[in-house]
Image (tube, rainbow, N blue to C red):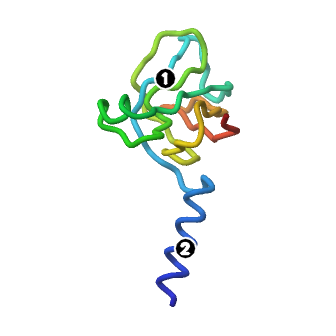
């Protein structure tokens, strides 16, 4: 019974974005984005067959993140939110530039 409670608790917390995901992904970044500065960002949700072609699960939300009109760069990103959301088309984030990359918290989805 205890293992079920631990498993259920972990999945619930993970589903609600309480556990971070450490990934490397493309993010659009202007060179003047300062450390500590936050921006609203969005990312498309990958659907089949594109997700499959890229080796990702259906509904993957972190292939590319759009934060401004800067060039896309591959960066370390810490995400708080679910990585697979096949029920949505776009996910929105509030991202902060850190000294080692970015930290993004999900703010919505549509």
Q: Please tell me whether mark 1 or mark 2 is closer to you in this view.
A: 2
Q: Tell me where residue 16 appears, x and y as whole percent.
A: 63, 56
Residue highlighted by disc 2: 8
Quadrant that contains the C terminus: top right
Q: Tell me where residue 22 appears, x and y as whole percent.
A: 44, 45
Q: Quadrant of residue 74?
A: top left
Q: Is residue 62 above or below residue 66?
A: below
Instruction: Give the mark nearest the N terminus, 1 or 2.
Output: 2
Q: Residue at x 55, y 81 (%)?
A: 5
Q: Tell me where residue 31 appears, x and y as whole percent.
A: 53, 11
Q: Is residue 97 above or below residue 30?
A: below
Please give left or right for residue 78 compared with residue 17 in the image.
Answer: left
Q: Is residue 27 above or below residue 56?
A: above
Residue highlighted by disc 1: 27
Residue nearest the observer in this picture, 29 or 3: 3
Please give left or right for residue 108 compared with residue 5 in the image.
Answer: right
Query: What element does badge 2 sit on?
Result: helix
Q: Quadrant of residue 105?
A: top right
Q: Residue at x 67, y 24 (%)?
A: 39
* Real-space CA distance between mark 1 and mark 2, rounded to the nearest whole angstrom: 33 Å
Residue nearest the observer in this picture, 9 or 49: 49
Residue lying farthest to the front in this orientation:
49
Q: Residue at x 52, y 42 (%)?
A: 86
């Amino acid at each position: 019974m205890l293992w079920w409670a631990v498993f259920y608790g972990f999945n619930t917390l993970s589903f609600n974005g309480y556990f971070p995901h450490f990934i490397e992904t493309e993010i659009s970044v202007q060179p003047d984005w300062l450390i500590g500065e936050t921006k609203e960002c969005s990312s498309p949700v990958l659907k089949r067959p594109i997700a499959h072609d890229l080796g990702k699960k259906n509904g993957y939300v972190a292939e590319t993140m759009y934060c401004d009109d800067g060039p896309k760069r591959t960066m370390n990103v810490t995400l708080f939110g679910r990585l697979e959301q096949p029920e949505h088309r776009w996910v929105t984030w509030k991202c902060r530039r850190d000294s080692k990359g970015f930290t993004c918290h999900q703010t919505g989805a549509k």
